[in-house]
Structures are given as C-alpha cells and as structure tokens.
Image (tube, rainbow, N blue to C red):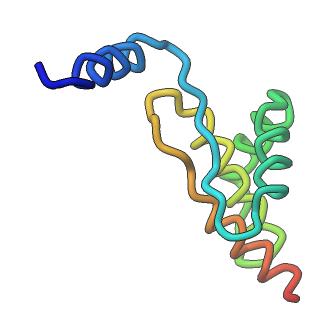
Amino acid sequence: MAPGMLFRTQARQKRRSDPVTPRGLVNLGNTCYLNAVVQALAHCTSFASRLVGDAATLEGGDNDAKVSRAFAHICSALSDRGRHSAVRPAELIGAIQARRPS
C-alpha cells in the first residue's frame, strides 16, 4: 500500500461511520457573516421547521416570498445529513440582492 493511502482509507471509513455529518455553506465572496447568521437560524429548530413547512404555501414572485423560499431551501439542505458537501447559498444571495439592490 502506498504511503498515505492507509490514512486516507481510514479517514474515508471514519466519515462513512459517522452518523452525523453537519453541512456548511460555501463562502461566495464576502458572504461569511451572512453564512454564519443563516447557519445559526437554520439550527433553531422551531424557526427552521416552521419556515420549511410554510415555504410550500408561499406563492407568487414577490421578493419577500423568494427570500423565504430560498432560506427554507437552505434550511432543508443543511439538515440533509446524508450529504457531505457544502451548500451553495447562491439562490438566497440572489433573492436578497433582488429584495435590497445595492
């Protein structure tokens, strides 16, 4: 076995056996503070579950509904424990920018 191969194999096996793998958000430019707030809110169980539940009933193309739907989508993606990759918050950032253009 090549040097380092055993370590990579052990690390891969540890990831597979870890039942809880939290997901994060990709930093898209200067979004680290936004990401921190989004992750904090997404882990407030009552807030996130209510938002995700209500997102299906939000209709229309107004900017408030777009922000709510995008945020609910991120909450759902962050709670998906079967994935190991980070979530790209591009939809939420776009919705926020449409709501509050600079």
Residue 101 in the figure: left or right of residue 24: right
Identity of the residue drawn at 78% across and 44% down: 51
Residue 83 or residue 58, whichever sits in front? 83
- Quadrant in the picture for residue 11: top left
Identity of the residue drawn at 82% across and 58% down: 34
Residue 50 in the figure: left or right of residue 28: right
Residue reaching furthest to the bottom: 102
Residue 41 placement (x, y as % from top left): 84, 41
Q: Give the vertical position of 7 relative to 92 (above or below).
A: above
Residue 97 placement (x, y as % from top left): 78, 79
Residue reaching furthest to the left: 1
Instruction: Assign the C terminus to one quadrant of the image.
Output: bottom right
Identity of the residue drawn at 60% across and 29% down: 22
Identity of the residue drawn at 76% across and 42% down: 39
Residue 8 or residue 55, whichever sits in front? 8
Q: Give the vertical position of 66 relative to 40 (above or below).
A: below
- Quadrant in the picture for residue 23: top right
